[in-house]
Amino acid sequence: MSKYNFIVIDDSALDCFIAEKMIVHTGLCETVRCFTQASDALEYIQASSLEAATLPTVVILDVLMPMMSGFAFVEAFEDLPEDVKERYTIVALTSSMNKTDMEKIVSYQVVKKLLDKPITSETIITLLER
């Protein structure tokens, strides 16, 4: 199986740490970058869009965050150029059982999957096999 780059966006530093450990444990990652602010991750994606295409990147995005929510991040991401967007796979992550939030986040075309917290190595492997 090929390797991937990962970006974890979660306002909880602990959840970022756990996700990073689970991702590294799969043996399928080249790099993992964690952001506790969605706006910082968006700036990183915009800046790295100027670089030559690298490995596909999986974005693990917490839906409910202060400042810039997962919804706001996805809306801003959708405005990026197609050649940038196609290098990323966005996976929403939530501990919310709010059906409205869940339906709203998966309604975005760029969101490929919705997963429950906490994320596990098995969940990531299953996700990448698709």
Image (cartoon, rainbow, N blue to C red):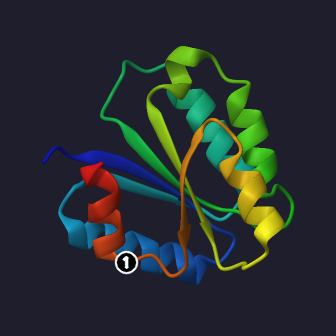
At 71% from the left and 45% from the top, the residue drawn is 107
Residue 117: % across, % down: 55, 79
Q: How crowded is mark 1: few (under 14 residues within 10 Å), some or many (20 or more)?
A: some
Which residue is the extreme one toward the right?
67
**Picture layout, residue 105 above or below residue 121:** above
Count of marks placed on residues? 1
For this rendering, which residue is in front, 63 or 50?
63
Q: Is mark 1 on a helix, strand or loop?
A: loop
Residue 57, visible in the rendered structure: yes
Quadrant of res 102: bottom right
**Picture layout, residue 123 above or below residue 90:** below
Quadrant of res 43: top right
Residue 99: % across, % down: 77, 70
| Position of residue 29 in the picture relative to residue 108 (left or right) | left
Residue 41: % across, % down: 63, 47
Task: Specify the amino acid type for callout 1.
Answer: Thr
| Position of residue 69 in the picture relative to residue 93 (left or right) | right
Residue 18: % across, % down: 44, 80
Residue 70, visible in the rendered structure: no
Q: Identify the residue position indicated by label 1 in the image.
A: 120
At 48% from the left and 25% from the top, the residue drawn is 86
At 80% from the left and 58% from the top, the residue drawn is 69
For this rendering, which residue is in front, 20 or 91?
91
| Position of residue 101 in the picture relative to residue 32 (left or right) | right
Quadrant of res 20: bottom left
